[in-house]
Image (tube, rainbow, N blue to C red):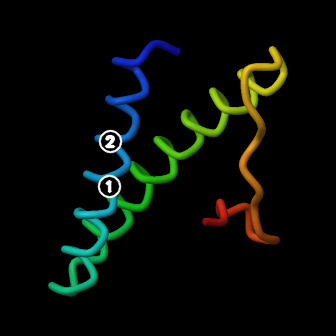
Amino acid sequence: MSFIDKAKAKAEELLGRAEEVYGESHGDAAAQVAGEAHRLEAEVELEEERAEEAARGHGTPRPTDEDGRTLG
């Protein structure tokens, strides 16, 4: 994953978070669910890249809690 792909995934994650918060604050369940989907998709992309880098010996996987959320 190139730097550009990482930046796109992070932007998608932030967009998802914003959409999710908008849905929560305005009572729009569809926007909330769509935002959560965008956020989770981007988080998966970023975690896959971190795991690939760790497998190649270029980094370490980030620790997660029991729900799979990254810590720190």
Residue 25 versus residue 7 in the image, above or below: below
Name the outermost residue toward the front.
58
Residue in the foreground of this view, choosing between 37 and 6: 6
**What is the x, y in percent for residue 8?**
32, 29
Q: How many marks?
A: 2
Q: Residue at x 37, y 40 (%)?
A: 10
The quadrant holding residue 25 is bottom left
**What is the x, y in percent for residue 52?**
74, 22
Secondary structure beneath label 1:
helix
Residue in the foreground of this view, choosing between 45 and 59: 59
Tag 2–tag 1 contact (CB < 8 Å): yes
Q: Quadrant of the C terminus?
A: bottom right
Estimate how packed mark 2 is, as few (under 14), some (14 to 19) or many (20 or more) residues with alpha carbons within 10 Å.
some
Position of residue 63 in the picture relative to residue 42 (left or right) = right
The quadrant holding residue 24 is bottom left
Q: Residue at x 26, y 75 (%)?
A: 21
Alpha carbon of mark 2 to alpha carbon of mark 1: how far?
A: 6 Å
What amino acid is found at the position of numbered circle 2 in the picture? Glu
**What is the x, y in percent for residue 29?**
30, 76
Name the outermost residue toward the left.
26
**What is the x, y in percent for residue 42?**
46, 41
Secondary structure beneath label 2:
helix
Q: Residue at x 29, y 41 (%)?
A: 11
What amino acid is found at the position of numbered circle 1 in the picture? Gly
Q: Which mark is residue 16?
A: 1
* Residue ID for mark 2: 12
Q: Residue at x 15, y 85 (%)?
A: 26
The quadrant holding residue 54 is top right
Residue in the foreground of this view, choosing between 29 and 21: 21
